[in-house]
Amino acid sequence: MASFRRVAVGATTLERFVSHFTNRLDAKGRVSIPAPFRAVLAQDGFEGLYVHPALEAPALDCGGHALLREIDGLLEHFSPYSPERDMFSTALLGTSEILKVDSEGRVSLTETIKTYACIASDVTFVGQGHKFRIWEPERFRAHLEEARNQVRDMRKELGARHAAAASRAHGARE
């Protein structure tokens, strides 16, 4: 199973987090980051692992410089002292942690982040392109099923819109 791939963007090649893996926490609360995910982090040049609670799910958003650039880009849309910027920066930066990756590619999940994501013994790492998420495995399975259902519904809706637009365009020619 491939877990990351190169995506050509103009003259630049980007590493992306893709696929998913489930690993067990050891007795000390450490978990091994999947090797392909570690390779993406190494290419990104981030020392450690940047982690913050996901805003809309009981999961953890993780990454390196690419994730931090995305957060910075989001914050730039708000004026420096606006309540919106304060709320986003508090939620995305104020609750974040930078975890140290040991020589064996493991991180120790703190009690705070384990509690937020309802993690006990196993975790599922889920690639999302520029970042990945850490989920409690059963919660991820439920989320994945819901995501698939919503994507199916969106696909049907997009197909219906496309067919209606094509019909209108065809009718306009006659």
Image (cartoon, grey):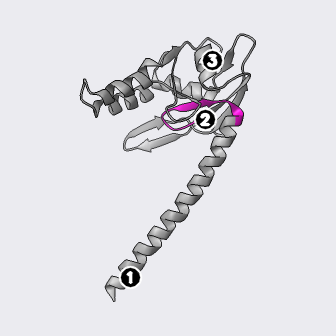
Instruction: Give the spatial CA distance, label 2 vs label 3.
Output: 17 Å
User: Circle 3 sits on which residue?
Assistant: 105
Work out whether 86 lies above or below 127. Answer: above
User: Circle 2 sits on which residue?
Assistant: 126
* The quadrant where residue 28 appears: top right
User: Circle 1 sits on which residue?
Assistant: 170
* Residue at 40% from the left image edge and 22% from the top image edge: 90
User: Upstream in the sequence, badge 1 or badge 3?
Assistant: 3
- CB atoms of marks 1 and 3 within 8 Å: no
Q: What's the magenta region?
A: 126-138
User: Upstream in the sequence, badge 2 or badge 3?
Assistant: 3
Residue 171 percent coordinates (x, y): 37, 84
Nearer-the-camera pick, 157 or 82: 82
Residue 86 percent coordinates (x, y): 33, 24
* Residue at 50% from the left image edge and 16% from the top image edge: 97
SS at circle 1: helix
